[in-house]
Amino acid sequence: MPTTGTQDGKVFAALASPVRREVLALLRDTGPQSVTALAAHFAMARPSFSEHLRVLREAGLVSETRSGRQRLYRLEAAALYEVQEWLNPFERYWREKLSNLRDLLDTLEDDEP
Amino acid sequence: MPTTGTQDGKVFAALASPVRREVLALLRDTGPQSVTALAAHFAMARPSFSEHLRVLREAGLVSETRSGRQRLYRLEAAALYEVQEWLNPFERYWREKLSNLRDLLDTLEDDEP
DNA sequence: ATGACACGTAGGAAATTTCCTACGTATAGT
DNA sequence: ACTATACGTAGGAAATTTCCTACGTGTCAT
């Protein structure tokens, strides 16, 4: 059952860039934004920034709606579900690891002053 | 509080490649494996595959232990916790989206034959 | 010691990504 | 109509990634 977006791993590729991850966080925290408003957070020529938006768009992570002469970008969080789904089967393994660590810390607390 | 691994976004960059995501899934499902055993799943020269392992290693996603003339690679799932942490603040947004979709489907079920 | 096996490293070609400076298009305001 | 604003596209340089073919190192088996 396809979640909605592009079935391949474009989402993972899109998340590889710190800039693009930050854009998603901005859209999450402040709602839909124009390109100029978003670009203001990054030291980068605007066309370069537009390219990042294109990658996010093609991954289904954002959508654009035109409003007058500006385009509002909106977070499409559903596309992130692909990542969560991929991550899920790993959860029990890092949980083991973390609880092992906690046990170790508890042991140290008890044995050493 | 650093989780353990490399603080920057190397984990995200490592996950950008389908090959590397598959390696992690293999290690998760079948336990620690030698390089040759892992490489058998991919149509790629072995040195190329070694490079992928290096990226995973430097991201803290796998560890290697030498055993005789082979090296066993092991999943270090704790490094994936960085991804889960990044993902968490987005969860409520895709949940909204998915439940909106469910509401819509329910509505259609009720109204249309 | 000698040969086979399991790997990594070196060096490089080809593709991709990331960034830039023009330049083009569409809308808004005068 | 004319200008300014908001963006994208074109084309290209530089860096990075991805893959290759040698080749080197350490380990095991004889």
Image (spheres, coloured by chain):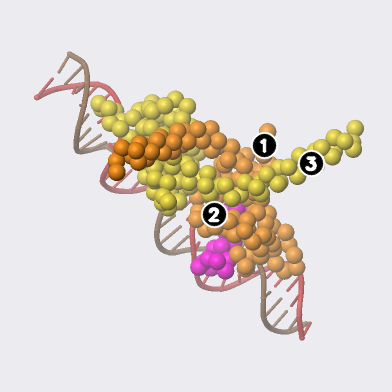
Chain colours: A orange, B yellow, C red, D brown
* Position of residue B48 measured from the top left corner of the image (x, y, whole percent): 38, 38
Q: Magenta span has A43?
A: yes
Between the C-alphas of marks 3 and 2, the distance is 30 Å
**SS category of the residue bearing label 1:** loop
Which residue, given by chain and number where applicable, does mark 2 sit on? A21
Dots 3 and 2: beta carbons under 8 Å?
no
- How many residues crowd mark 2 within 10 Å: few (<14), some (14–19), many (20+)? some
Q: Which residues are magenta?
A: A39-58
* Position of residue A40 measured from the top left corner of the image (x, y, whole percent): 57, 69
Q: Residue at x 45, y 33 (%)?
A: A96
Judge from the rendering whether residue A76 lies leftward or rightward of residue C17; answer left or right. Answer: right
- How many residues crowd mark 3 within 10 Å: few (<14), some (14–19), many (20+)? few
Between the C-alphas of marks 2 and 1, the distance is 23 Å
- Does B13 sit above or below residue D20? below
- Does A78 sit above or below residue B72? below
Of residues A44 and B12, the one drawn nearer to the viewer in this rendering: B12
Judge from the rendering whether residue B23 lies leftward or rightward of residue A107; answer left or right. Answer: right
Which residue, given by chain and number where applicable, does mark 3 sit on? B103
**SS category of the residue bearing label 2:** helix
